Amino acid sequence: MSKTPSGFIECKEEVQKLSNRLNSSNYREVKDELISLQRNLGQLDLSRDERTLLKETIDHCFEKINAFRESEQKAFELTSEQNRGKLTPLVEKALFEARYNDDIRQAWDFCVSVQNEFKGIRLQKEIREMLYQQLQEAFDMLKQRRSQQQSVLEQKSLSGKKVLLPVVEAMVAEAEKATDVEDHWRKLIELQQEIKDRDLTFEARNELLNKLQEAFTIIKLIREEKQAEEAQQSFSNALTLDEMITEGEALASNSDEFKVVFDRLKQIQQAFRGFSLPAEEREDLYQRLQQAFETIKGRQEAWFSERDRETRENYNRLKPLVLNGLERARTSNEFKKTREMLKNIQAEFKGLRMKAESRQELYSQLQKAFDILNQRHDEYMATKKDKMELKVDYQLSDIELRIEEMQQEIEKDREHMAELSETGDNPLFKGSETDPADDIHNQVQVLMAAISRKENLLFELLHEKESLLQKKEKWASLGNETDET
C-alpha cells in the first residue's frame, strides 16, 4: 500500500484494488496487505454500515485467499505424491545396491546420485524424512561393508607386498646389467601393471611403484645413452648420404647415360632405406633424392621427345614423296624417269631415323609403286608389239633388264646391310643412350624382307625368262616350219 486510507471511500477503493489484484500467485502478498488494512480500520471514524460493508468485502477476499491456499496445498500434496513415486524405487534400489553390489564404490556413487535427487524436489516433510532415513541406512550399510572390505584388503595387501617386493627389487638390480633394454622395459611395464591390478592398500602400492620407478630411471638413462649413440650414427649416415645424393644430383643434371644414372639413383635410394637418419635430415634428403629422379626423368623425356619429333619430321617429309611417286607410277608414261625418281626416293630412306612401323608403311607403298610401274610398263610394251616374236624379244630384253636391276638392287641392299651391321657392331656406340642399334635393327629387318621379296621376284623373272626363251625357240621353229612350207 502506498499510503494509509483516511476515509471510507479511500478504504473501499483500496479493498477493491486488492480484490482485483488477487490471484493464485500473489495471494500471500495481498493477504498481508489486507491484514494491515484491517488493522487500520479500527483507527478510522466510520459508521456501522460502512464498517460492515468493508468487512464483508475484506472477508470475501479472505475466502478467495483460503481457496487459493487450499488449491495450492492440494497441488503440493499431488506433486509430493508423484515425487514420492519417483524417489521410492530409487531409494529401494539404493538399499539393494548397498546390500548386494560387490562393487562398493559403484554402490556408493549410486546412493550419492539418489541423494542428489532430493535437492529441489517438492515433498511433504514426513515423506522426505522417511525416504531420506532409508537412504541413510543404505549409506550406513556401505560404510560398514567398506570398513570390513578395508580389513580384508589390508590382509591381501600385506600378502601381495611380500610376494611383489622381492620381484621389484630383483628388477631394479637387473636394470643396471640389462643387455636387452627394450625387453627389460617391457617387463617393467608388465610388473607395473601387475602392481596396479593387485589388491593393495594405497600405501603399499605407492611403496612398490616408487621402488619400481628406480628401475625405470636406470633403464631411461641407458636408453638415453643408446639414443645419443644412435643420434651420432644417424648424423654420420646423413653426411654419407648427403655426399651420395650430391653425386646423384650431378649425374641427373649432366649425364646422358640415362640407364646408368637411374641405376645409381636406385642404389642411393636403397641405401637411404637402410640408413637410420634424424627426422629433419631424412625429409630434406628424401626430397633432394626425389628431385634428382624428377630431373633425370625430365631430361630423358625431353630426349625421347626430341627423337620422336625427328622421326615424325622424317616421316612427314618422306610420305608426300612416296605418295607422289605412287601417283606417278600409276599415271606417268615416262617409265624410265619415274623409275629413277622412285630409286631416288628409295635412297632417301638410308640413314633416316624413323619408327619401324612408319618405315615399313612407307617402304611398302614405295615397293607398291615399283610393282605398279613395272606392271604398267609391261602392259605398255605389250601393246606396242605387233608380232609375237618381237614381243617375246622385247619381253626378254625387259626381263633381263629387270633381272640385272634386281640383282644390282639385291647386291646394294646386301652391301647396305653389311654397312649397318658394321655400324651396329662399332664399340663406339656400345652403352650410349643415343645408340642407334634399335633403329639399325629395324632397317636391317626391312632390308632383309625387301631382299627376300626381290629374290622371290628374281626367281620368278628367271623362270619367266626361261619360259620366254622356250617360247622364242618354239616360235622360231614354228617360223622355220612355215618358211619350209
Image (tube, rainbow, N blue to C red):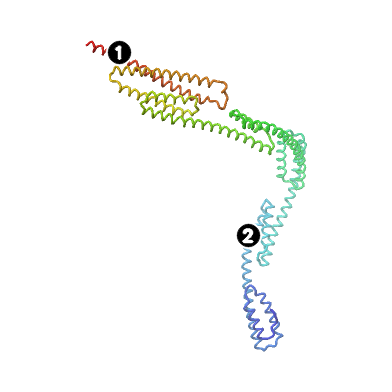
Q: Amino acid at mark 2?
A: Pro
Give the image quarter of residue 40.
bottom right
Mark linked to residue 89: 2
- The answer to whether residue 140 is above or below residue 444 is below
Q: Nearer the viewer, mark 1 or mark 2?
A: 1
Q: Is residue 379 above or below residue 481?
A: below
Residue 37 vertical position relative to residue 383 in the rendered view, above or below: below
Question: Which quadrant of the figure has residue 77?
Answer: bottom right
**Residue found 72% across the figure and 57% down from its top:** 140
Q: Residues within 10 Å of mark 2 (few under 14, many from 20)?
A: few
Provide the residue designation for mark 1: 473
Residue type beneath disc 1:
Glu
Name the spot of residue 397 as percent of width and height, x first: 35, 17
How far apart in space, not on screen, are marks 1 and 2 (Cα)? 135 Å
Residue 44 rendering spot, x and y as whole percentages: 70, 86
Q: Tell me which residue sits at (74%, 43%) in the image.
A: 160
User: Which one is in front, 406 or 36?
Assistant: 406
